[in-house]
Image: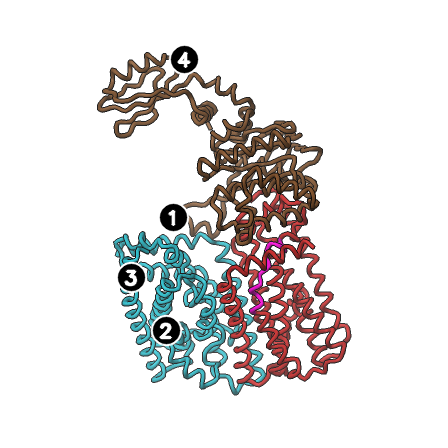
């Protein structure tokens, strides 16, 4: 498959720079380690927050971190889209007889992101038993849905950022509010920030659909089976993102670079 | 068959002003100017033709190339290339074109060139046998056998450009767009690239559109020239016609010890540094021998040479003539 | 002196050009401060007894931290300077009639000031008008405010003198990425940018307070918010001055030694 070919060429290419790779992986691991450490210190001091225990928070943190690192690993092309446009790579993409989104996805596969992923996996292996969740089949499925949906939603946010790049490359750091912010503040169940924030992250950017409602189901705080399937609704977020991309692409084609 | 009719394109450009006060103002209000990049550009190019596309920077050359590649949508006008409109049928259209951007490589930097070739083969879905045949041919013609297993980052600019051109031809495109292909290359590589392009055009009947500032490229390769200036096609003609047109000009270069030059009818001073002066002679107004006499009366000449117009000068005079 | 001023002015103007970036930065900082305060509010709700400072103090701390984010952030390293080191253009820099250490010091400071200038005012204004206790409140007396200003300036110099050490170390590692990637999150954590230092467990906190990182933003922010006063504050200020002078001294000596080496080897 064509994506597989890109995958192996990226791998070959990045493996040429072993030291840099391992340093980046280490850096990634450390950054998320300090996020983990903050949770440890804060929960160590306060014991619990809004009724959520330390292990439950860790579970939430690990899910969000994992979803984010997977999205970063595979949708990095959109996350770094401003450079794809500015160095002419996108024009090269337009001159190839393949779908543009596919090509952008394939243009960047960053393996060093496994640093964060590794951190998430370590945390989740602790959190899964410690959180007190009774891991029946439906709970496991919920967790899987949460991961897939989170990955899709973060990718959707990257896609929105990339679409903005068609119009301007300045001032787009506001998107960090939702991507990095979504990851940092999403480490805690979104309800602790209050009604307004929860509503925003349910109806505008559906982070809560993968991180909060199914989490309630997971930890037994709610028996509502719909919550188990809400992550799948969150995946639909990709639809408006895609529409915005097409709008941006049309604009790019009519104004050049 | 490439046909453009009345293509128009206008761009909106933000103004940026210098200085502290302006920068502060710009925080609150943005100003724009409108630039008409292309005004009713029309031309047609037949299959297998090789044309040189010239003009000063900012004249609109890259915009037309982008329109023909399908990257840019014009404001109005038509463009039909082998039955397709580039920006409307992008995927179908780009299957049959190859593009070489002089300064931006399509090769992967850290893996052997052959890996990039294979990826391109897969992107264009070139079947195995055809790929092998093309690859062998291109490797032989461009002398790539020794470098094809080296990563692009270890190649010299000349070697990289040869690989670049090979990469753009692996899928047998009917049309090849070359944007500054010889820029930065040493003399030997330039000749190699030119010979190859000429051969491809002759043997495979590939239509070649060459955008360049290097006039020797033009002289070596193209017969037909399109001159684009201020968004319009100012000239569409053959190179030999153009040369005849400006063969009225000759350049006299001389080294002198001391002297003062008076400008006369037909003699214009192009440059004068440290005892070395260059003049342009309009042979319609003054003969070469008269010009030489006049100049030797003005200065104590130690060396003198007379040269006919080069392609470079031809273009300069064209630019002057059209005021671009 | 004039040279320093014009160098400063050029970099400052350059940074002002990026209007949209400024707006976006401000919005991001509102959001961040806002969300952080909501997070700590949730902790306060759960267990206010263990809260190491008044909530109102925390609000001032967080808003000031956000407003001056780009001023105090440890990992801002001028990429121009990094490139000059790694590609050997150091020769050009050395041929100018300014002492290299001071030149780079000024470059770093002016870049920080211009980035912070645009963003801090809107954030400060917005934060001042929020309902208590989420707002940025005024310091409770003038001496506290004066000390805040003084220690802020010292903090800025401390951060930059630390950056100078990183620049110089790059001469030896020759890689702009290396140390940065691994150490940047550690430095941010230690300076209190990830969670305010008062929230760290006591044992760890005592150690971190002794490092130069505690003097980089933590000290002035605590002085302003009133979280630190009296003898403890004086101790903190003395420690800050100590670290600043130490790093300046080490920096200058080290640079001298390094440049000698560079000149001998030819870059």
The residue pinned by badge 1 equals B19
Q: Residues within 10 Å of mark 3 (few under 14, many from 20)?
A: few
Which residue is pictured at 64% across the width and 61% down the height?
A155
- Asked if marks 2 and 1 fall on the same chain, the answer is no
Q: Which residue is mark 2?
A: C148
Question: Could you tell me which secondary element the residue under label 3 belongs to?
Answer: helix
Q: Is residue C84 left or right of residue B303?
A: right
- Please give the residue where the numbered disc 4 appears in the rendered image: B284
For the residues labelled 4 and 1, the Cα–Cα distance comes to 50 Å
Label annotation for residue C261: 3
* Residue A111 in magenta stretch: yes
- On the same chain, marks 2 and 4? The answer is no
Spatial CA span between label 3 and label 1: 40 Å
Distance from Cα at disc 3 to Cα at disc 4: 66 Å
**Rounded to the nearest whole Å, what is the CA distance between mark 2 and mark 4?**
82 Å
Viewer-closest of B189 and B61: B189
Residue B192 in magenta stretch: no
Rendered brown, the chain in question is B
Residue range in magenta is A104-115
Q: Chain of mark 2?
A: C
Q: Quadrant of the C terminus of chain C?
A: bottom left
Q: Colour of chain C?
A: cyan
Residue placed most toward the observer, B1 or C239: B1
Q: Is residue C36 above or below residue C17?
A: below
Is residue A97 something that shows in the picture?
yes
* Circles 2 and 1: CB atoms closer than 8 Å: no
Q: Which chain is red?
A: A
User: How many C-alpha atoms fall within 10 Å of the one at disc 4: few (<14), some, or many (≥20)?
Assistant: few
């Amino acid at each position: 498959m064509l994506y597989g070919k890109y995958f192996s060429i990226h791998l070959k290419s990045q493996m040429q720079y072993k030291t840099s790779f391992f340093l980046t992986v280490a850096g990634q691991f450390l950054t998320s380690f300090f996020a983990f450490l903050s949770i440890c210190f804060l929960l160590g001091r306060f014991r619990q927050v809004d009724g959520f225990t330390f292990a439950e928070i860790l579970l939430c943190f690990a899910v969000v971190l994992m979803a984010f690192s997977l999205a970063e690993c595979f949708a990095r092309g959109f996350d770094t889209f401003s450079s794809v446009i500015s160095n002419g790579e996108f024009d090269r993409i337009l001159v190839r007889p393949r779908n543009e989104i596919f090509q952008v996805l394939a243009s960047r596969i960053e393996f060093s992101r496994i640093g964060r992923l590794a951190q998430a996996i370590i945390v989740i292996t602790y959190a899964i038993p410690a959180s007190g969740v009774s891991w029946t089949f439906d709970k496991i499925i919920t967790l899987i849905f949460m991961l897939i949906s989170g990955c899709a939603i973060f990718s959707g946010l990257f896609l929105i950022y990339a679409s903005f790049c068609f119009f301007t490359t300045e001032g787009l750091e506001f998107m960090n509010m939702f991507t990095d912010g979504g990851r940092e503040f999403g480490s805690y169940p979104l309800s602790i920030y209050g009604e307004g924030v929860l509503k925003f992250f349910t109806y505008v950017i559906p982070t809560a659909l993968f991180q909060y409602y199914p989490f309630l189901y997971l930890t037994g705080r709610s028996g509502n089976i719909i919550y188990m399937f809400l992550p799948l609704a969150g995946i639909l977020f990709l639809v408006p993102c895609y529409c915005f991309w097409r709008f941006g692409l049309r604009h790019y084609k009519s104004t050049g670079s | 068959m490439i046909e453009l009719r009345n293509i128009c394109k206008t761009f909106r450009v933000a103004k940026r002003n210098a200085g502290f006060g302006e920068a502060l103002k710009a925080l609150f209000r943005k100003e724009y100017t409108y630039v008409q990049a292309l005004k009713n550009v029309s031309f047609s190019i037949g299959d297998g033709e090789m044309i040189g596309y010239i003009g000063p920077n900012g004249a609109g050359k890259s915009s037309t190339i982008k329109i023909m590649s399908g990257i840019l949508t014009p404001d109005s006008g038509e463009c039909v290339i082998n039955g397709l409109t580039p920006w409307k049928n992008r995927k179908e259209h780009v299957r049959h074109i190859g593009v070489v951007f002089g300064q931006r490589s399509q090769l992967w930097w850290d893996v052997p060139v052959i890996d990039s070739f294979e990826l391109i083969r897969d992107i264009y879905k070139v079947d195995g046998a055809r790929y092998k045949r093309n690859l062998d041919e291109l490797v032989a013609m461009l002398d790539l056998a020794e470098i094809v297993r080296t990563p692009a980052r270890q190649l010299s600019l000349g070697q990289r450009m040869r690989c670049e051109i090979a990469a753009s031809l692996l899928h047998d495109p009917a049309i090849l767009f070359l944007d500054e292909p010889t820029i930065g290359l040493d003399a030997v590589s330039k000749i190699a690239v030119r010979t190859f392009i000429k051969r491809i055009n002759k043997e495979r009947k590939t239509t070649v559109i060459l955008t360049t500032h290097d006039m020797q490229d033009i002289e070596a390769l193209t017969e037909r020239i399109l001159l684009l200036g201020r968004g319009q096609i100012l000239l569409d003609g053959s190179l030999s016609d153009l040369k005849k047109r400006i063969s009225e000009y000759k350049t006299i270069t001389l080294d002198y010890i001391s002297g003062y030059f008076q400008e006369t009818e037909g003699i214009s001073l192009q440059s004068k540094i440290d005892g070395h002066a260059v003049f342009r002679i309009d042979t319609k107004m003054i003969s070469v021998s008269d010009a030489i006499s006049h100049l030797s009366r003005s200065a104590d000449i130690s060396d003198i040479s007379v040269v006919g117009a080069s392609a470079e000068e031809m273009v300069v005079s064209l630019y002057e003539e059209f005021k671009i | 002196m004039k040279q320093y001023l014009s160098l400063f002015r050029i970099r400052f103007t350059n940074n002002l050009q990026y209007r949209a970036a400024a707006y976006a930065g401000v919005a991001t900082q509102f959001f961040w401060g806002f969300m952080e305060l909501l997070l700590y509010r949730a902790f306060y709700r759960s267990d206010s007894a263990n809260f190491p400072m008044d909530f109102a103090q925390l609000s001032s701390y967080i808003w000031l931290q956000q407003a001056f984010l780009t001023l105090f952030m440890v990992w801002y390293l001028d990429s121009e300077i990094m490139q000059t080191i790694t590609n050997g253009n150091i020769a050009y820099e050395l041929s100018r009639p300014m002492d290299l250490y001071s030149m780079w010091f000024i470059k770093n400071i002016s870049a920080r000031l211009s980035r912070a200038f645009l963003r801090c005012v809107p954030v400060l204004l917005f934060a001042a008008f929020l309902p208590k206790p989420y707002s940025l409140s005024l310091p409770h007396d003038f001496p506290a405010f004066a000390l805040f200003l003084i220690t802020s300036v010292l903090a800025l110099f401390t951060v930059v003198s630390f950056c100078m050490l990183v620049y110089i170390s790059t001469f030896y590692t020759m890689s702009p990425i290396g140390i940065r990637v691994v150490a940047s999150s550690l430095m941010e954590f230690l300076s209190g940018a990830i969670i305010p230092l008062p929230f760290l467990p006591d044992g760890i906190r005592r150690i971190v307070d002794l490092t130069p990182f505690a003097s980089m933003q933590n000290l002035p922010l605590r002085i302003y918010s009133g979280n630190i006063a009296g003898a403890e504050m004086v101790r903190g200020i003395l420690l800050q001055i100590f670290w600043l002078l130490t790093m300046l001294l080490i920096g200058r000596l080290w640079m001298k030694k390094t440049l000698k080496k560079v000149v001998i080897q030819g870059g």
